[in-house]
Image (cartoon, coloured by chain):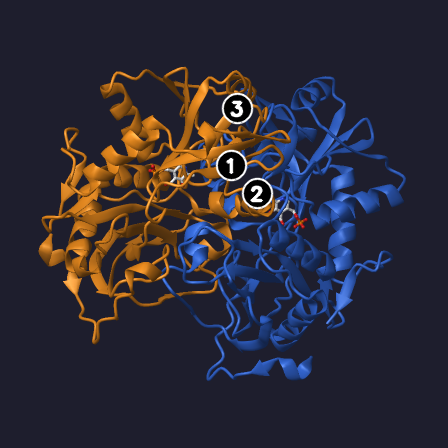
Chain colours: A orange, B blue
Amino acid sequence: MNQLIERRKVTARKEKPDSASLGFGKYFTDYMFVMDYEEERGWHDPRITPYEPVHLDPSASVFHYGQAVFEGLKAYRSEDGRVLMFRPDQNIKRLNKSLRRMSMPPLDEKLALEALIQLVELEQEWIPIEKGTSLYIRPFVIATEPSLGVRPSKRYKFMVVLTPVGSYYGDQLKPIRIYVEDEYVRAVTGGVGDVKTSGNYAASLQAQRKAEELGYDQVLWLDGVEKKYAEEVGSMNIFFIINGEAVTPALNGSILGGITRASVIELLKSWGIRVREEQVAIDDIYEAAMRGEVSEVFGTGTAAVISPVGALHIHGETIELNNGLIGEVSERLYETIAGIQVGKVRDSFRWVVEV
Amino acid sequence: MNQLIERRKVTARKEKPDSASLGFGKYFTDYMFVMDYEEERGWHDPRITPYEPVHLDPSASVFHYGQAVFEGLKAYRSEDGRVLMFRPDQNIKRLNKSLRRMSMPPLDEKLALEALIQLVELEQEWIPIEKGTSLYIRPFVIATEPSLGVRPSKRYKFMVVLTPVGSYYGDQLKPIRIYVEDEYVRAVTGGVGDVKTSGNYAASLQAQRKAEELGYDQVLWLDGVEKKYAEEVGSMNIFFIINGEAVTPALNGSILGGITRASVIELLKSWGIRVREEQVAIDDIYEAAMRGEVSEVFGTGTAAVISPVGALHIHGETIELNNGLIGEVSERLYETIAGIQVGKVRDSFRWVVEV
Ligand SMILES: Cc1ncc(COP(=O)(O)O)c(C=O)c1O
Ligand SMILES: Cc1ncc(COP(=O)(O)O)c(C=O)c1O
């Protein structure tokens, strides 16, 4: 593997940004990973190169027909100086699932994992160390064939870029306000909502803007067929704690199977908390909340790990949850997962990969 | 306007391909149009440049979150040497509709039209003259801001490229075989199916491949909610001639409002043929066909103008239509619209714009 990756040196290393100004996805490291695909040759030329512009023909199919998929995961620096990644194998599996759904060629999973590891190793000085910060890893694949025929491209680029990111919440978990969207639809069974393809995100922007204008942080999507059942939040899955049990929408083909979601389910079960993955009618949530049975609602995703929900706007009414405080289960999940990620909590599920 | 567009000269003009080998979207002309957008400056620097690669940061948002919209229209050379475009104002209107839906900044419609006209004028030698050939015009807008935040990009590029394209059918209209897709879904009300955004096309590739493997040319999509109602074909709208009346799915928010579709409706009405735009249940079509009441089915779109349908695969059965021949209405529509496009038939609707 080592020989496969040629290294071209950057002439000058960039200055590293101050950890307070990191934000999300604004600064990129010195190097990136690139590999090309051509129909006749398959995936070839894996390499680490300086972080530099991509040159594409104006007719490259990604610009016109949107074959583009991506992943997102994080690398952390543990207190004892090790570099840790959280379940990267799962991200690569999901990347391949996305590639197949979008008629794009899957990657060799071992090689892709090795690419992440080598790149993060090379760039480990870029991992910020303040609480809640990390090095975000963005693998993505785009269609590059210069042709306007509506058919799968015959050429692709797999790239990995790295960006140091700030703490999602600053010092402590801050509950978010969620708008249940009943006009716009994100995805529907038979579509591509269960994979990470670029078009899903462009399609969500207008609803997100509307929610913000109305004073909410994020949208909770309903199913596209009946607009009755909760699906997921912007880039998080959603959990409800009702009468001490956890309820989350089942993976029905139109929501993304989050890796944080899967980890939360495993953890909750290991703690003896029952988890139901099922259709979740938003009206049932409303009624349960009115009866005082909903003790916590939280989102799960790579960006924030656990995102407590403090308010839920449903059909014209805003329900305040848990007095705008962080619930007990949310907090315990956050401390456990974030702890495992930085090597502070014992990794009994073997989720962490050391670079 | 003229001064707005700076021309940088190509050093050598490309060789023009032989008209028999044109295909679709394989060859591009010497020049393209480019204009940039930045949040602070708005759209600026309209210019014609040599056709050349685009340089984008690997984190450019089009690669990750899919803000990309496009249009497609054609320029023709008339027998008396004029250069004609078909309803370009409609394409620019629709481009702006797509831009707004995808949270992208709309264009000045006059300037955009002028860009098409000036570029086509400069490149008019590239318009092929054989029957059925034309110069395909591809305006498109992509998000270019280097940032991984999931929010509308603050920078965009509007580009126009030109590609000489071959005759869709060779010498005569050839009926196509259509597979009614009842597993995959293209779009749903509340989504983005009614605009030309890149993600819609990537999402359709897998179903298209399936149809081809089963021996069909294209997919007919059903609605995403009940999978009962006809929506549209790959990149065409669909019409049924039933008992002498034309029936086509209404613009319900999940299908594209085709410009050929609108033109066909106007023409049919002007000929005294009744047109119903409504929900079209595929089972009703099946039954009407069994009773011998469906005399013609055809698709409408810029690529082929009118595309007669010779066979329709519905829920496991294949219905042959009109003995695989071209219907009378289809043929008359094709001759009229294609005739207007090349200046051979009187343009009583003022659809044609002379360059
Ligand atoms: C649409 C969507 N849902 C859910 C998630 C959460 O997935 P994960 O926990 O793997 O980050 C993400 C983020 O990746 C997402 O983009
Ligand atoms: C999805 C879709 N439907 C219909 C059409 C037909 O539209 P028009 O007649 O404007 O070419 C197209 C092509 O533009 C299309 O891409």
Figure quadrant of the N terminus of chain B = bottom right
* Mark 3 or mark 2, whichever is nearer to me: 2
Disc nearer the start of the sequence (1/3): 1
Q: Is residue A322 left or right of residue A180?
A: left
Residue at horizontal 61%, vertical 28%?
B312
Marks 2 and 1 close (CB-CB < 8 Å): yes
Marks 1 and 3 close (CB-CB < 8 Å): no
Give SS at disc 1.
strand
Q: CA distance from mark 1 to mark 3?
A: 15 Å
Disc nearer the start of the sequence (3/2): 2
Q: Which residue is mark 2?
A: A211
Disc nearer the start of the sequence (2/1): 1
Residue B192 image point, x, y percent: 59, 43
A183 or A63, nearer to the observer: A183
Decide if ligand 1 comes within 8 Å of the CB at mark 3. no
B191 or A220, nearer to the observer: A220
Residue B54 image point, x, y percent: 44, 68
Identify residue type, mark 1.
Answer: Ile
Q: Quadrant of residue A224?
A: top right
Task: Tell me the crowding category of disc 2: few under 14, some 14 to 19, or many 20 or more residues within 10 angstroms, Cα based.
Answer: many
Give SS at disc 2.
helix
The chain to which mark 1 is attached is A
Identify residue type, mark 3.
Answer: Tyr
Q: Which residue is mark 1?
A: A178
Figure quadrant of the C terminus of chain B = bottom right
